[in-house]
Amino acid sequence: MNVENHPVVSREEWLAARKQHLANEKAFTRERDRLSAERRALPWVRVDKDYRFQGPDTEMRLADLFGEHSQLVVYHFMFAKDWEEGCPGCSFLSDHIDGANQHLAHHDIAVVAVSHAPFNEFQDFKRRMGWKFDWLSSADSDFNYDFGVCAKAEDAEAGKATYNYEKTDSAEEEMPGLSVFYRNDNGEIFHTYSTYARGLDMLVGAYNFLDLTPKGRNEDEIMEWVRHHDRYEGEKASSCCHLK
């Protein structure tokens, strides 16, 4: 973005424009609060299927992912069987998890990542990235398919796959997403929310910084500039997160 010819005004003119924008910001904040309340009021679906996940030591059930918490956030990380490294866009988002987790763990929320690849296949990459959050495999279950982030190869090739609640010819076998679950005092588990594509923007704190700057996100395609955080001095990795 070219910012060299941007208008320059007096402090008084700037203050008047800033106050007008502040009114719009406050309106946006109120609308965001309303939307968040609407999200929390959405109906739930009881989860009856016995999903199994592979962790570092043993097989785990969905209930095990909650730990001692009643709320669970699952980030569907794009990492398929035989991949050598994770999606750059998913990695960009995941760089934000550990910092938030220090606080969320004390506010009744467990956060985990789940990928379709076998557990052992993404351990080297996790160590390379230096992440501490729990990251599990759903390789032997329907979890990724049921929650809209995996498609059968034949459906993706035929343009019949569903992503972000609609059929699309741009969906691939692996796609990103986030799902939220609640466990009540009786141990029943409910699916409360899932989001995909641009709905994941809210998890990328770096974008909030960029949105405050003169050049903004400064990208022709979403995350085109993003690399794994240890690769900024090397070749740029293309994003595969389809957040349009």
Image (tube, rainbow, N blue to C red):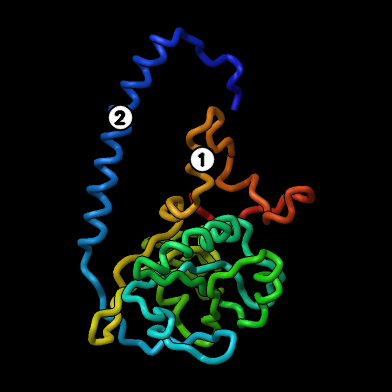
Relative to residue 120, is residue 195 drawn left or right?
left
Please provide percent x and percent y for residue 194. 37, 65
- Amino acid at pointer 2: Asn
Residue in front for this viewpoint, 78 or 211: 211
The crowding category of the residue bearing disc 1, from other C-alpha atoms within 10 Å (few below 14, some 14 to 19, many at least 20), is: few
Q: Quadrant of residue 38?
A: bottom left
Q: Is residue 87 left or right of residue 66?
A: right
Choose the circle earlier in sequence order: 1 or 2: 2
Q: Is residue 212 left or right of residue 15?
A: right
Instruction: Measure the C-alpha gap from mark 1 to mark 2.
Output: 19 Å
Q: Which mark is residue 195?
A: none
Q: 170 or 104: which is nearer to us?
A: 104
Residue at 32 percent across and 66 percent down: it is: 193
243 over 115 or under it: above or below: above
Q: Position of residue 221 (x, y in %)?
A: 58, 43
For image coordinates 64% across by 49% down, the residue present is 226
Q: Amino acid at mark 1?
A: Phe
- The answer to which quarter of the image holds residue 43 is bottom left
- For the view shown, which residue lies furthest in the bottom direction? 58
Residue 215 in the image: above or below residue 35? above
Would you name the residue on which mark 2 appears?
24
Quarter-of-image position of residue 12: top left
Quickly name the residue at label 1: 209
Residue placed at 73% from the left, 49% from the top? 232
